[in-house]
Image (cartoon, grey):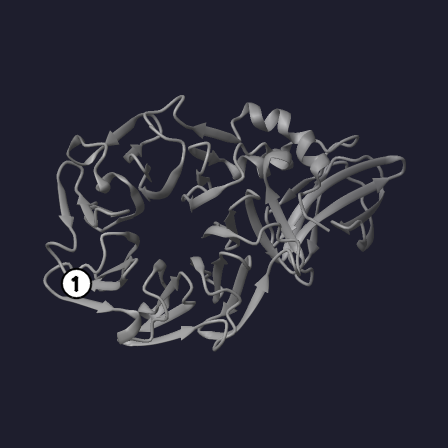
Amino acid sequence: MKLFFSISIFQFLLGSVNAQQLLTVYDTSNTPLIINKINCLAKEGNILWSGSEYGLTSFDGLSWNFFLFNNQSTSYLNNILAITIDAFGNKWIGTAGGGLGKFDGTNWNIYSTSNSPLPSNIVKAITIDSQNKMWIGTTAGLAIWDMDTTWTIYQQFSSALMSDNIECIVLAFNDTMWVGTVNGGLTRVVDTSLVTYTILNGGVPDNTIQDIAIGNNGFRWLGCAAHGLSTFLYNSPPFIELSPANSDMPSYTINSLAIDTAGKIICGTYESGLVRYLGGIYWQVFNESTIGLPDSSINDIIVDANGVIWLATTNKGIVRFNEPMLYLSIQNNSLPDHPNIKIHPYPATDFINLNTALDGNKFAIKIFDVTGKKIREDFIQSTQTNFEIRMDISEFIEGIYFVKINSGLNTQSGIFVKI
């Protein structure tokens, strides 16, 4: 069963949520953006940076700034594929033909095949490790630069790389680097040791890895070009595939990944919007029908410190998804036909607290999963009209649950999420 929080519940709540700007769209109609296709995003404090085929923009929540290299809109340096911000506030820009750019807010420095050992002027990924070394993914190999004079280049025919076309680079614990390639699988780099996993030798479900995310719980997540979402634990395969072929993941093509503030993996898909995996068989899909998402093609995702999700889309510019407001609305609004129970914490791990204002002295509490199956039923007695019930949910599997409390002919309903 596909998990949409139940579309009927979403639709019931959206009237009040939309009024509070659950979704805010920034595109060519209301910002200095020249094109609605946004390739990449980065956050620097409260400033959002975005890159497209026509330059770099910054947004501080109120005003926008638009930057072009040398004010030349045709420069290859203005076709931006990647953005990384270093500890000094420098913006490092990966471009589609102009090499690597460094922008300090005023001045540009350019590193290309003509003035550096950079193996290609097409730079698709940039990551800075804990030793302040820059890892640069190009279409002609992987470059590691100490930001001074030392460059190390890994290429297919001189290393364990199985492809020179580098799509993404992510830093894990203990300076282990994970490198996703086009048609060359996944490569793990520890110091100078490289190990590559492909369909043939490592069981990875797809040889094109478009993004990688590292979970705090030890899970590594892969966004695949043709096999959906894949995961494995720490540095050890086997790889587990989660795709439309074996789950309710709605897309085979994952463009971008991020870890949300609850530690869950969220996926930006090519055609199915935004998807979160809650664990087990449970998925959340955020698209036009569930929350009114204006574009189902997501190129990049970042989650800010407040839990707000920022999306770089193909057709609708930048979308700000204030997801915490959605959960707050679920908590504070009544469900159809019944006053809502107040449930906290939200989401919950081991316990939930239920606040009810029902009159009576005998109460039946029932909990159902998203399929409608009754998971638990308790009976309590109380002489209070406003009281709190604490329930142990530590043995529940991760997912969304519905609660009903009955007292005589009166009923209250509520929702909680177990993570």
For image coordinates 62% across by 47% down, the residue present is: 284
Q: Is residue 393 above or below residue 178?
A: above
User: Three-letter amino acid code at disc 1?
Assistant: Asp
For image coordinates 85% across by 39% down, the residue present is: 407
Residue placed under numbered mark 1 in the picture:
146
Residue 201: image location, x then y, percent = 47, 78
Q: Is residue 312 above or below residue 187?
A: above
Left or right of residue 389: residue 23: left
Residue 199: image location, x then y, percent = 50, 71
For image coordinates 52% across by 52% down, the residue present is: 253
Residue 328: image location, x then y, percent = 58, 36
Quick one: label 1, few (<14), some, or many (20+) residues within 10 Å? Answer: some
Left or right of residue 88: residue 235: right
Residue 56: image location, x then y, percent = 27, 36
For image coordinates 57% across by 67% down, the residue present is: 240
Nearer to the camera, 389 or 382: 389
For the residue labelled by badge 1, is the local secondary structure a helix, a strand or a loop?
Answer: loop
Nearer to the camera, 383 or 197: 197
Q: Is residue 339 above or below residue 415?
A: above
Report the label total. 1
Q: Is residue 179 above or below residue 332?
A: below
| Residue sitting farthest toward the right | 408
Q: Is residue 315 visible?
A: yes
Q: Quadrant of residue 350?
A: bottom right
Left or right of residue 39: residue 249: right
